[in-house]
């Protein structure tokens, strides 16, 4: 009796894999191949590496001029900029892939086969996360070369922070898919993703600037009101949008708090799962046709 | 023309009169605060509108209940007290509450704050109760003794100078005289003391409290409610102030234990170690000045608690491990056309400007402060590196490598697609 049940279970899993898993795996392979054989991801990594080169050159200039520079991690600013750039690219790329295939009718075509909205988005999500892993390795290679060329120290925490940035990047890809599932056209989708990314970063910058402006505790003045508003809005967006996870994960990791960084990565993965499920529901609701 | 000039002068004078307004002073209940900080006891004021008072947890601070004249000073944007106009002590006890329940009731006590090495240097000591009165009396006696000794010295010096003049005159006449010996100057009097005041001694564990003064009639004194935060440090480490020989006026701080120090090859650096504690930026800024608009609630800052220059510094590099001891150094301005400074070891009898460990950077160095037993002090390890300061072109080339890889992949894909299309045509 037990043997029969076991065989039935194995058969079910195999048939489920043949019906849904194989097409999903094929879509992941195809998507990964098409994205990695385009120039755009390499250009983004080159941009991130150029940013690191600029920052490090500035540090070297300070050592040359002043004879002394004390710094926690010379790659911290570059890493933040690089991971943010890659995350925004990943969100935009994922959103564009879905919106374009929807416009071209590919999604409709796929739906006639054994491909559900969730498995389609899961394939897109997985291929983009794998793409991010490849790009992070490329960026790490560039950082290692820069560290060798400059003699500036690439710390172990920087490498760990890069590895753990997969969580926030996955959250960014999921958000891109959600936006594409809710908005049909390519251009508005891209604009929405870029708007969300720039809005989050802009809010973060405004918060930092306002926090540095002096404002007495007991006087109600415009700086205090703006600061309060920026803190209130950013405290919501840092959980609602994935780009806040990038900031949190990196700042915690670069301080050497591995447990804190792991918890942020787990939170980002949970965010990605929830948003992916919402995206699948959204795609079902808005329909597969253009 | 003359009339116009007079009118203009009158207008200018009247404008001046209008600007020179006396600030409006209001009689208020205030707390005078003498909060313990690592740089000494910091005196500040907590007036209306009320704001949070910050003190260091586990350290003794004083709050005094007073009535004074408070005015707003627009230039600094702060409320100030006119103590000379009114400085009345408010009777009663201080109630410290936590989560709405009375925790402790503190009585008023006399206190005095003394600086054994002068008001701007060294640690400050707080004496409370009978000890305060005793210490203050001792201070007054020592000060009077110094004053008398100084008066005797000045008189002796006057006589000595007169004797010198007489001796010089006698020598000019050809008379041989023995020169008088110079009087000895009394040792400088450095001890500084505040007057004896009364206040409430606060020494609370970390937490958020409410305080208020209950008068002798059993009622809470109006306007005496405040929030008080006792905060503590997040981390402890050894912080370094690093003085480059070529730029001694602009020292750098290496407080973060994970920070790396980059310097030029052969650069001479002077390390000054301090025991350091990391505090919340906003809390410490408000500790120093409760009305401060500076400080970030999400920021952290390192504060030095004491110098550790008496310890030894261990340097481990390619040439082996060596131990350096701290020495005093003197900064001398270079003479001649070449402007700049020179750091030297002070000749005997001359004072020093700072003390520290001299380190000449020769490649990568691992440094750590050693305790009395010769073990590295936790949090004192630092890495000193010499970066490559040559040409900058590799920094421009490296970002092009991923782009080159991408171009290669795209070219390969196109070739593959072209080959597939050709094979289909065939």
Image: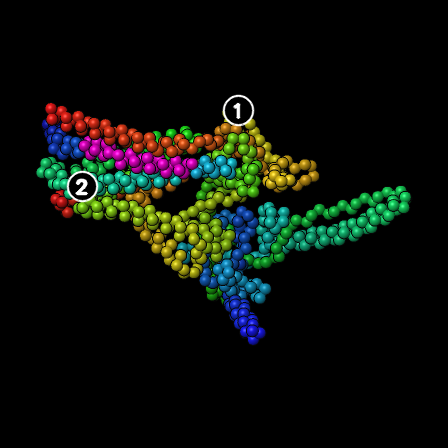
Whole-number angstrom distance, CA of label 1 to CA of label 2: 63 Å
| Residue B295, above or below B361 | below
Viewer-proximal residue among B350 and B420: B420
- Is residue B156 visible in the rendered image? The answer is no
- Tell me: A200 left or right of B341: left
* Marks 1 and 2 on same chain: no
Q: Residue at x 29, y 36 (%)?
A: A43
Say which quarter of the image contains residue A89: top left
- Tell me: B323 left or right of A212: right
> Residue A73: percent from the left, percent from the top?
42, 37
Subunit of label 1: B
Q: Residue at x 60, y 47 (%)?
A: B121
Viewer-proximal residue among B227 and B96: B227
Name the residue at the front extreme. B1
Predominant secondary structure, magenta span = helix
- Given contact means CB atoms under 8 Å apart, are the residues at marks 1 and 2 in contact? no
Q: Residues within 10 Å of mark 1 (few under 14, many from 20)?
A: few
- The colour scheme used here is rainbow
Tell whether position B129 is magenta.
no
Q: Which residue in the protein does label 1 denote?
A: B319
- Is residue B350 visible in the rendered image? The answer is yes
Q: Which stretch appears magenta?
A: A28-57
Tell whether position A50 is magenta.
yes
Name the image quarter holding the C terminus of chain B: top left
Give residue A176's mark: none
Viewer-proximal residue among A130 and B48: A130
């Amino acid at each position: 009796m037990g043997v029969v049940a076991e065989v039935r279970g194995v058969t079910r899993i195999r048939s489920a894999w043949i019906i849904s898993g194989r097409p999903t795996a094929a879509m992941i392979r195809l998507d990964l191949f098409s994205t990695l054989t385009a120039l755009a991801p390499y250009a983004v990594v080159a941009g991130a590496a150029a940013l690191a080169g600029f920052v490090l050159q500035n540090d070297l200039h300070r050592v040359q001029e002043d004879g002394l520079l004390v710094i926690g991690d010379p790659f911290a600013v570059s890493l933040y900029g690089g991971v943010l750039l890659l995350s925004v690219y990943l969100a935009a790329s994922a959103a564009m892939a879905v919106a374009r295939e929807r416009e071209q009718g590919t999604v409709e075509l796929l739906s006639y086969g054994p491909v559900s909205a969730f498995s389609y988005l899961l394939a897109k999500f997985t291929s983009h996360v794998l793409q991010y892993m490849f790009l992070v390795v490329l960026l790490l290679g560039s950082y290692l070369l820069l560290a060798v060329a400059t003699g500036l120290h690439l710390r172990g925490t920087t490498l760990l922070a890069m590895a753990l940035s997969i969580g926030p990047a996955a959250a960014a890809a999921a958000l891109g898919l959600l936006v594409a599932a809710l908005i049909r056209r390519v251009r508005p989708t891209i604009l929405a993703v870029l708007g969300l990314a720039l809005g989050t970063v802009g809010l973060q910058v405004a918060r930092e600037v306002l926090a540095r402006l002096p404002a007495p505790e007991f006087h109600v003045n415009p700086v205090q009101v703006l600061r309060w508003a920026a803190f209130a809005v950013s405290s919501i967006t840092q959980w609602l949008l994935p780009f806040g996870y990038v900031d949190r994960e990196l700042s915690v990791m670069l301080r050497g708090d591995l447990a804190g960084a792991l918890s942020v990565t787990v939170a980002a993965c949970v965010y990605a799962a929830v948003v992916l499920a919402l995206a699948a529901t959204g795609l079902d609701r808005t329909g597969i046709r253009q | 023309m003359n009339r116009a000039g007079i009118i203009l002068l009158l207008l200018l004078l009247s404008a001046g009169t209008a600007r020179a307004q006396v600030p409006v002073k209001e009689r208020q209940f205030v707390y005078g605060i003498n909060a313990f900080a690592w740089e000494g006891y910091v005196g500040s004021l907590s007036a209306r509108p009320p704001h949070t008072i910050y003190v260091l947890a586990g350290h003794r601070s004083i709050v005094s209940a007073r009535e004074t004249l408070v005015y707003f000073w627009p230039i600094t944007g702060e409320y100030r007290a006119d103590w000379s106009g009114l400085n009345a002590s408010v009777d009663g006890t201080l109630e410290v509450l936590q989560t709405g329940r009375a925790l402790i009731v503190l009585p008023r006590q006399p206190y005095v704050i003394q600086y054994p090495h002068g008001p701007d240097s060294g640690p400050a000591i707080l004496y409370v109760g009978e000890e305060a009165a005793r210490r203050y009396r001792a201070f007054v006696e020592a000060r009077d003794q110094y004053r008398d000794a100084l008066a005797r010295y000045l008189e002796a010096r006057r006589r000595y100078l007169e004797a010198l003049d007489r001796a010089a005159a006698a020598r000019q006449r050809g008379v041989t005289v023995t020169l008088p010996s110079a009087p000895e100057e009394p040792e400088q009097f450095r001890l500084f003391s505040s007057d004896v005041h009364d206040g409430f001694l606060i020494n609370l564990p970390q937490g958020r409290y409410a305080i208020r003064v209950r008068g002798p009639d059993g009622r809470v004194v109006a306007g005496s409610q405040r929030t008080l935060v006792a905060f503590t440090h997040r981390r402890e480490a050894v912080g370094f102030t690093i003085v480059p020989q070529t730029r001694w006026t602009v020292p750098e701080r290496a407080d973060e234990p994970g920070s790396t120090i980059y310097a030029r090859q052969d650069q001479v650096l002077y390390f000054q170690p301090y025991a350091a504690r990391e505090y919340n930026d906003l809390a410490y800024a408000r500790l120093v000045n409760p009305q401060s608009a500076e400080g970030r609630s999400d920021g952290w800052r390192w504060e030095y608690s004491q110098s550790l220059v008496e310890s030894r510094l261990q340097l481990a590099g390619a040439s082996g491990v060596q131990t350096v001891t701290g020495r005093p150094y003197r900064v001398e301005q270079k003479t001649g056309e070449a402007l700049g400074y020179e750091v030297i070891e002070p000749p005997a009898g001359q004072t020093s400007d700072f003390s520290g460990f001299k380190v000449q950077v020769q490649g990568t160095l691992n440094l750590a402060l050693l305790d009395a037993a010769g073990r590295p002090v936790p949090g004192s390890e630092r890495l000193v590196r010499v970066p490559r300061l040559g040409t900058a072109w590799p920094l421009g080339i490296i970002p092009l490598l991923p782009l080159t890889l991408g171009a290669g992949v795209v070219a390969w894909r196109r070739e593959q697609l072209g080959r597939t299309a050709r094979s289909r045509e065939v």
